[in-house]
């Protein structure tokens, strides 16, 4: 099948824009009327729904930030009544407070529909066996891909993360043809398979991988193709927008963003002015049909560019280029978002260490490893090595539970870590991606 | 018998496991005219603890602390040990029979005798026990 929903995916651009305007107008009226948060923000900005008379008028609307989700924890931004919600997902926040996303039945439908189009555009469909090796649970990756793959009629193998050897056995035994996971986990699977005497290239039917949730590169795409014989397709989405939403079509030149679901803008990170197609800046997203948690001009912090020229695949929807970084200091470790401020916050609660820290990230084999250096507090020094080891394990445990990602801790002498005035540079990223 | 006289103040330093740390500590002792009588290094992943018996513990503590080192005092005991096969067994077995645990220990062997330095979980009991078995304990004022 070429398109999942040809009526929408091949709609002439002019018609798409008309549809976008209609959806935007409805959305703005809805949030102004039913969301106290957006109502207040629009009042403050001196903008009324009647002022939105073209798609370009979207720039009159105020921005919304990740901080707003945190400040309104748990559900201040959720517009639907709880009985209308069919699911919650929760992601870790910047200072301990998580971000809660509520989904109505319609939100889940649109999310799955978005992925159904995306997976079809990557050449997947009925007859494929798709192993979903993203985490299932509060993280959106696993369940998102699961619903999308079921929608297109693929057979889903919901392996989630971990137990790699079993995953490889099942991949062989159940004739898996496609996998969804992080690119580093895919390479890791390749290495584990090799140790088991299994060649993913020759001994399995795996041919396509939908990979994302962490930074990766064209070089990695080539490495995956050469070592595993697998075509890797980039996928994009964040929990605030629902979860993973878009992936590359078979031409692999950026991912199509479905114009009936999302209106993307690109901002110059310095001047905050809109940038034309082709120029890189911060992605700002308006979700045109999201009910539970409406998203209007959300500053994603992701850096990319919009491409509007027609795609050889025939889809008329614009594409976004591969992400090339963040405007803030957010790190992505094994697919989990980590802000240095979370580490700072967690360390403040541990009297055995000082508040100064440095982060070193490396990729050992295929998995990200995060090392955090902290200074041992004077009062916490014990002459016994076992006490010091216990302190270190304690710090690791507290950080792990606050960041949801495995960390190693190194204790350093007091006063030895760098002190920063102004913008701190606490991260040393040694990953080759 | 007062046990206190046999409790020797050992200085312990927290140190990262990297070149130059021992040299920095040793140089500081030299500058303060502090003599190191015995020392050991215990290492774990990425860090270590330097332990030393010095003749002027207060001067060493002050100097090293002012340099930013994490320094602590710990009470250890030092006992003369026969410098011949069985010398260590004699002491270790007495402690073990009494259920006293040695947390760590180091030793040096000099011209005429060997000295065993012990950090135990029950300091006073260990001193009384060794004393009652006629072992020669080193009094802190004889060295510090």
Image (cartoon, coloured by chain):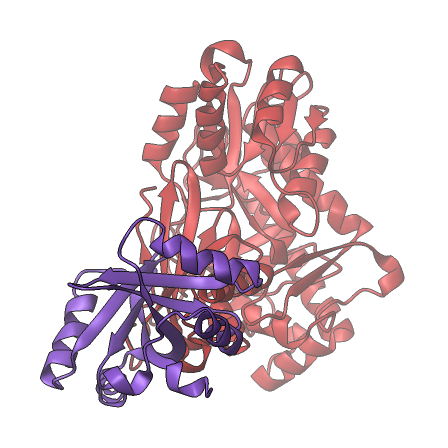
Chain colours: A red, B purple
* Along the viewing direction, whichever of B113 and A121 lies nearer the viewer: B113
Instruction: Judge whether residue B45 can be spotted in this image.
Output: no
In this picture, is A387 found above or below A87? below
* Along the viewing direction, whichever of A144 and A422 lies nearer the viewer: A422
In this picture, is A18 found above or below B105? above
- Give the image location of residue A275, x and y in percent: 37, 60
Name the residue at 16% across, 65% down: B20
- Give the image location of residue A110, x and y in percent: 71, 45
Name the residue at 51% across, 39% down: A182
Name the residue at 36% across, 39% down: A217
Is residue A361 rendered to the left or right of residue A202?
A: left
* Along the viewing direction, whichever of B101 and B70 lies nearer the viewer: B101
Is residue A428 rendered to the left or right of residue A35?
A: left
User: Residue A151: which quarter of the image?
Assistant: top right
Count of marks, rendered view: 0
Is residue A108 rendered to the left or right of residue A411?
A: right
**Quadrant containing the N terminus of chain A in the rendered view:** top right
- Give the image location of residue A104, x and y in percent: 80, 54
* Along the viewing direction, whichever of B119 and B87 lies nearer the viewer: B87
The residue most toward the right is A83
Is residue B139 rendered to the left or right of residue A64?
A: left
**Quadrant containing the C terminus of chain A in the rendered view:** top left
User: Residue B28: which quarter of the image?
Assistant: bottom left
User: Residue A125: which quarter of the image?
Assistant: top right
Instruction: Judge whether residue A256 can be spotted in this image.
Output: yes
Name the residue at 55% across, 74% down: A62
- Give the image location of residue B74, x and y in percent: 40, 78
């Amino acid at each position: 099948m070429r398109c999942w929903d040809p009526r929408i995916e091949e709609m002439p651009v002019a018609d798409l824009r008309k549809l976008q305007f209609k959806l935007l107008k409805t959305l703005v009226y809805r949030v102004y009327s039913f969301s106290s948060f957006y109502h207040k923000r629009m009042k403050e900005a001196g903008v009324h729904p009647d002022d939105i008379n073209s798609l370009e008028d979207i720039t009159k609307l105020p921005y919304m930030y990740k901080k707003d989700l945190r400040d309104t924890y748990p559900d201040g931004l959720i517009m639907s009544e709880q009985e209308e919600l069919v699911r919650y997902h929760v992601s870790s926040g910047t200072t301990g407070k998580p971000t809660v996303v509520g989904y109505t039945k319609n939100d889940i439908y649109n999310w799955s529909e978005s992925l159904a189009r995306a997976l079809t555009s990557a050449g997947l469909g009925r007859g494929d066996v798709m192993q979903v090796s993203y985490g299932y649970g509060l993280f959106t990756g696993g369940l998102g891909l699961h619903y999308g793959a079921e929608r297109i009629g693929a057979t889903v193998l919901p392996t989630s993360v971990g137990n790699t050897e079993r995953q490889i056995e099942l991949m062989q035994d159940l004739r898996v043809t496609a996998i969804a996971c992080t690119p580093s986990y895919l390479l890791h699977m390749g290495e584990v398979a090799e140790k088991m005497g299994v060649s993913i290239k020759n001994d399995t039917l795996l041919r396509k991988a939908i990979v994302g949730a962490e930074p990766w590169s064209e070089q990695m795409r080539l490495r995956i193709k050469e070592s595993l014989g697998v075509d890797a397709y980039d996928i994009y989405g964040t929990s605030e927008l629902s979860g993973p939403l878009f992936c590359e079509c078979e031409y692999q030149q950026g991912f199509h963003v479905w114009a009936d679901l999302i209106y993307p803008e690109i901002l110059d990170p310095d001047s905050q002015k809109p940038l034309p197609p082709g120029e890189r800046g911060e992605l700002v997203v308006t979700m045109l049909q999201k009910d539970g948690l409406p998203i209007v001009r959300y500053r994603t912090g992701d850096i990319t560019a919009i491409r509007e020229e027609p795609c050889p695949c025939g889809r008329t929807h614009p594409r976004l280029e591969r992400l090339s970084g963040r405007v803030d200091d957010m790190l992505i470790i094994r697919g989990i978002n980590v802000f240095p401020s979370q580490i700072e916050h967690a360390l403040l609660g541990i009297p055995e260490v000082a508040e100064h820290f440095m982060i070193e990230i490396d990729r050992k084999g295929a998995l990200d490893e995060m090392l955090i250096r902290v200074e041992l507090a004077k009062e916490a020094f014990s002459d016994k090595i076992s006490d010091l080891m216990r302190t270190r394990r304690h710090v690791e445990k507290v950080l792990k539970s606050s960041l949801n990602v495995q960390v190693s801790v190194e204790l350093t002498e007091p006063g030895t870590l760098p002190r920063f005035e102004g913008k701190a540079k606490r991260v040393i990223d040694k990953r080759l991606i | 018998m007062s046990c206190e006289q046999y409790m020797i103040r050992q200085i312990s330093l927290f140190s990262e496991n990297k070149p130059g740390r021992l040299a920095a500590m040793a140089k500081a002792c030299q500058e303060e005219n502090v003599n190191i009588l015995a020392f050991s290094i215990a290492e774990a992943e990425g860090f270590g603890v330097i332990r030393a018996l010095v003749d002027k513990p207060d001067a060493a503590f002050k100097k090293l602390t002012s340099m930013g080192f994490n320094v602590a005092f710990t009470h250890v005991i030092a006992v003369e040990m026969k410098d011949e096969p069985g010398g260590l067994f004699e002491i270790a077995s007495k402690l073990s029979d009494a259920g006293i645990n040695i947390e760590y220990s180091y030793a040096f062997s000099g011209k005429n005798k060997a000295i065993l330095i012990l950090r135990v979980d029950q300091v006073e009991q260990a001193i009384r026990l060794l004393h009652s078995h006629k072992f020669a304990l080193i009094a802190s004022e004889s060295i510090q």
